[in-house]
Amino acid sequence: MNALPYRPWILAALLAVLVGWPSSLSAQRRPNIQLTFRIVEANGFEKADPEIEDIVEDLQEIFRFEGYRLLSTSVINTIPYADFSQALSSPQGDRFGLMGEISDDEEGDQYHRLQVQLVEVTDEEHDGLLQAAVNLRDGQTVVLGSARPTPEAAALILVVTARFSY
């Protein structure tokens, strides 16, 4: 009698298909999420900043400032339910911190919930500038808000663009 050689992986694959293991794995997939944060300074700048030309029109619809320039950029790669933090600095020596978390969409993969805080870092302390929570879709750019570190300072605007990959 010719017996088939015993192959444990065949039995494991058969059991996995019978109990639905592959479908449960696909339901548990977690995306890699790339968040590109831009801190934009608004204070009547006359020269157009080519690094933010893709968002200036949107900024002008929301805010009434004369001009905008990019102050700092940060790209953060994360996954749902992992905290992230990032230090940023401007060419003028301003220091900032971004902290937050992104969570899954309970209804599927259409969006993810971002909670983020922007702080200004000084030698003595961390001053909270802005907190925001928003639902993000893949490829979407969102203006999260604006803040002024001091009444005489330029307004700072926080913008995020999200990219999801599975």
Image (cartoon, rainbow, N blue to C red):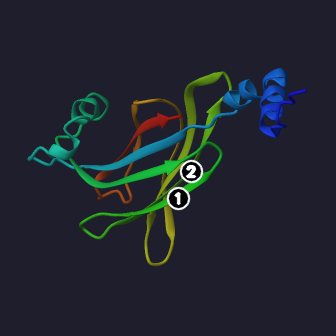
Q: Is 93 left, or right, of 48 in this rendering? A: right
Indicate whether 93 appears above or below 78. Answer: below
Mark 2, other Cα within 10 Å: few <14 / some 14–19 / many ≥20: some
Q: Nearer the viewer, residue 108 or 58?
A: 108
Q: Is 13 left, or right, of 61 in this rendering? A: right
Q: Nearer the viewer, residue 107 or 15?
A: 15
The secondary element bearing badge 1 is classed as strand
Contact, mark 2 vs mark 1 (Cβ under 8 Å)? yes
**Residue 141's spot in the image, x, y percent?**
38, 33
Q: Earlier in the sequence, mark 2 or mark 1?
A: 1
The secondary element bearing badge 2 is classed as strand
Residue at point 65%, 45% (across, down): 81
Quarter of the picture containing the N terminus is top right
Residue at point 63%, 23% (across, down): 108
Cα separation between marks 2 and 1: 7 Å
Amino acid residing under circle 1: Ser
Residue at point 20%, 46% (across, down): 51
Q: Mark number for residue 100?
A: 2
- Name the residue that disc number 1 marks: 85
- Please identify the quarter of the rendering in which residue 123 is found: bottom left
**Residue 117's spot in the image, x, y percent?**
52, 51
Q: Mark number for residue 58?
A: none
Q: Nearer the viewer, residue 26 or 125?
A: 26
Mark 1, other Cα within 10 Å: few <14 / some 14–19 / many ≥20: some
**Residue 163's spot in the image, x, y percent?**
43, 36
Q: Is 68 left, or right, of 72 in this rendering? A: left
Q: Residue furthest bottom?
A: 123
Amino acid residing under circle 2: Gly
**Residue 4's spot in the image, x, y percent?**
83, 30
Q: Nearer the viewer, residue 148 or 99?
A: 99
